[in-house]
């Protein structure tokens, strides 16, 4: 997993025979992905993320008129919290789908909360299970990964949309925007990257290449931002296609002060626009902490900038050819200043895996 990410692997979690049967024939990467959600720890972390969980709760509870008597599909239901929110909001029936064996605990949770007659939980891949309804009125899903798209769960939500969402149906949430900004982080970069120049008297510079190509998931202080944020990509879940998730998008970062730029960071904002009163939350450095934190891409070279100068470039993203749940990311940038000595351009490649 990425540097700085929390534990979401669970190799110590035993499979049930049914889980093992369901995963027979999958490649190792797919098995690793699904079994990483077997462990209770990752679900505890997500449930304790109040920004995440309360935003979904409020979007559902404050829009009972949308959920009343509707059939709801919860894609990647985990422990079933969104399914139970939907029932409390008046849904006629909820179908939760999850490949992970955590769904066995979800069934127990649903039962002890007296909702078994209202919630049907199916273990399997969304693309393979057979739902008890041909169409659903609402899709709810917490599909977002680090850098929004890591783990490629959005593809599964789009499949569910195209296969099951009734005409005029709603998706919760339905908008997502990736933002970029540049930061000054010389001390940490020296600790993370420069460390390899001298390791107990030995030159470990070959490891520097690895360090430079692995994004870091971490919290960034607001004071580190050298530029204004830039909305590099917005996804509308009603219209986006899987092909749109491989993209090359331009950005333009306006410097707020004279400083150095050591890295570019990314975060995302989420919107529930179907709500009577729109609900949003952000995973940026200006907002309350979330478990997604921010994604940090360190540049090979340090940029020296002045206030109001602009760094332009492109952000490229595509699923990795060997493992579609990993991402190949490239950031190219150019910077021109009145001082020719401060002209710079570069291209950095990263892999999130």
Image (cartoon, grey):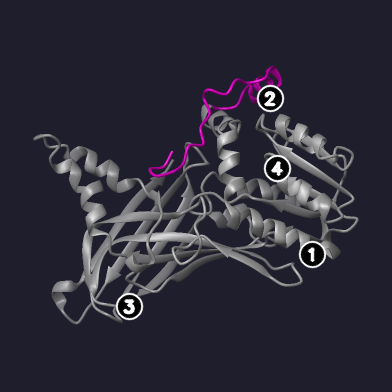
3 left or right, relative to 128: left
| Residue 267 visible in the snapshot | yes
Which mark identifies residue 253? none
Label whose residue precedes the other's in the sequence (4 or 2): 2
**Does the residue at mark 3 contact the one at mark 4 (Cβ under 8 Å)?**
no
**In terms of depth relative to the viewer, which is nearer, 155 or 140?**
140
Q: Residues within 10 Å of mark 1 (few under 14, many from 20)?
A: some
First to last magenta residue range: 1-27
| Residue 129 visible in the snapshot | no
User: Disc 3 versus disc 1: distance between alpha carbons?
Assistant: 40 Å
Q: What kind of element bears circle 3?
A: loop
Label whose residue precedes the other's in the sequence (3 or 1): 1
Question: Eyeballing the image, is 41 above or below 236?
Answer: above
Which quarter of the picture shows residue 205? top left
**Residue at the (52%, 25%) spot, across then down:** 11
Residue 186 spot, x, y in % from top left:
23, 58
Which mark identifies residue 22? 2
Which mark identifies residue 256? 3
Q: What kind of element bears circle 2?
A: helix
Label whose residue precedes the other's in the sequence (3 or 4): 4
**Residue at the (32%, 76%) spot, across then down:** 255
Label whose residue precedes the other's in the sequence (1 or 2): 2
User: Disc 3 versus disc 2: distance between alpha carbons?
Assistant: 53 Å
Q: Nearer the viewer, mark 3 or mark 1?
A: 1
User: Disc 4 versus disc 2: distance between alpha carbons?
Assistant: 17 Å
């Amino acid at each position: 997993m990425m540097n700085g990410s929390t534990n979401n692997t669970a190799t110590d979690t035993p499979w049930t025979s049914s889980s093992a049967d369901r995963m027979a024939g999958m490649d190792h990467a797919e098995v690793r992905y699904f079994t990483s959600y077997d462990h209770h720890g990752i679900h505890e972390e997500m449930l304790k993320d109040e920004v995440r969980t309360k935003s979904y709760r409020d979007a559902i509870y404050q829009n009972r008129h949308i959920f009343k008597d509707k059939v709801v599909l919860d894609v990647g239901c985990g422990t079933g919290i969104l399914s139970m929110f939907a029932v409390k909001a008046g849904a006629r029936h909820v179908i939760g789908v999850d490949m992970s064996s955590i769904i066995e605990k979800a069934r127990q949770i649903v039962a002890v909360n007296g909702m078994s007659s209202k919630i049907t939980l199916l273990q399997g891949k969304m693309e393979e299970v057979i739902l008890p309804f041909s169409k659903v009125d609402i899709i709810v899903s917490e599909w977002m990964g680090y850098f929004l798209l890591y783990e490629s769960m959005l593809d599964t939500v789009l499949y569910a949309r195209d296969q099951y969402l009734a005409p005029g149906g709603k998706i919760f949430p339905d908008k997502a925007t990736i933002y970029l900004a540049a930061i000054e982080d010389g001390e940490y970069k020296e600790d993370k990257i420069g460390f390899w120049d001298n390791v107990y008297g030995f030159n470990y510079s070959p490891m520097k290449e690895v360090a430079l190509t692995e994004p870091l998931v971490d919290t960034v202080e607001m004071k580190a931002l050298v530029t204004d944020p830039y909305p590099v990509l917005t996804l509308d879940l009603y219209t986006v296609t899987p092909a749109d998730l491989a993209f090359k998008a331009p950005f333009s970062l306006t410097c707020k002060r004279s400083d150095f730029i050591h890295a570019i960071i990314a975060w995302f904002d989420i919107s529930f626009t179907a709500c009577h009163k729109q609900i949003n939350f952000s995973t940026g450095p200006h907002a309350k902490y979330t478990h997604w934190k921010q994604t940090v891409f360190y540049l090979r070279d340090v940029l020296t900038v002045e206030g109001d100068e602009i760094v332009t470039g492109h952000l490229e993203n595509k699923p990795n050819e060997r493992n579609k749940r990993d991402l190949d990311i490239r950031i190219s940038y150019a910077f021109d200043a009145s001082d020719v000595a401060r002209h710079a351009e570069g291209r950095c490649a990263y892999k999130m895996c």
